[in-house]
Image (tube, helix red, strand yellow):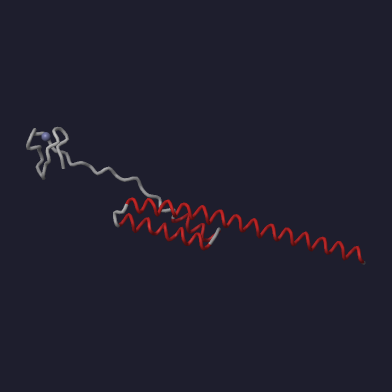
Amino acid sequence: MYCTKCGTQIGNELKCPNCGQPVQPVAQAPLPTVPAYIVWSILATLFCCLPGGVVAIIYSAMVGSKLAANDYEGALKASKKAKLWCWLSFGIGLAMQLIVTAIYVIMMFVCISQKDSSVLHL
Ligand SMILES: [Zn+2]
């Protein structure tokens, strides 16, 4: 720790040995919380895309373990990857839904048109 007034290094004294400035324990600036996106990851797994959601859950879990290991940078990276995979799963899930719906609609039209032609042939 260093004196805020003169910059002298201070051990455990309550006053600066150089200038007498009372030493205030420097409160560690709390680091911003790292969002884990665990809820979004689970939702993405359940409703969007299972493989992508599982990757998101793994990164979400990594955020917690990295924070526990005081690896703030690592936690931040894992958090960003969890968010990315949530969006990817959401996008893939949405695309799959659109494709399935499109196939369903096409098949319906095929069935209807076949029915019509069979009616015409009768
Ligand atoms: Zn001082």
Q: Residue at x 78, y 59 (%)?
A: 109
Name the quarter showing ligand 1.
top left
Q: Say whether residue 108 is left or right of residue 58.
A: right
What is the number of callouts on the image?
0
Q: x and y percent of residue 89 in the render? A: 53, 56
- Position of 9 relative to 109 (above/below): above
Image side of residue 110 versus residue 94, left or right: right
User: Image quadrant of residue 14?
Assistant: top left
Residue sitting at 44 percent across and 59 percent down?
Answer: 57
Q: Is residue 27 above or below residue 105?
A: above
Is 37 displayed left or right of 20 in the figure?
right
Indicate the position of residue 55 as horizontal and vertical percent values: 46, 60
Q: Quadrant of the N terminus?
A: top left
Tell me which residue sits at (46%, 55%) in the image: 39
Image: 34 above or below 49: above
Residue at image coords 37%, 55%: 63
In the rendered image, the quadrant that contains the C terminus is bottom right
The quarter of the displayed image where residue 9 is located? top left
* Name of the residue lying farthest toward the left: 17
x and y percentages locating residue 13 in the rendered image: 9, 42
| 24 sits left or right of 19 in the view | right
What residue occupies the far right of the structure in this picture?
122
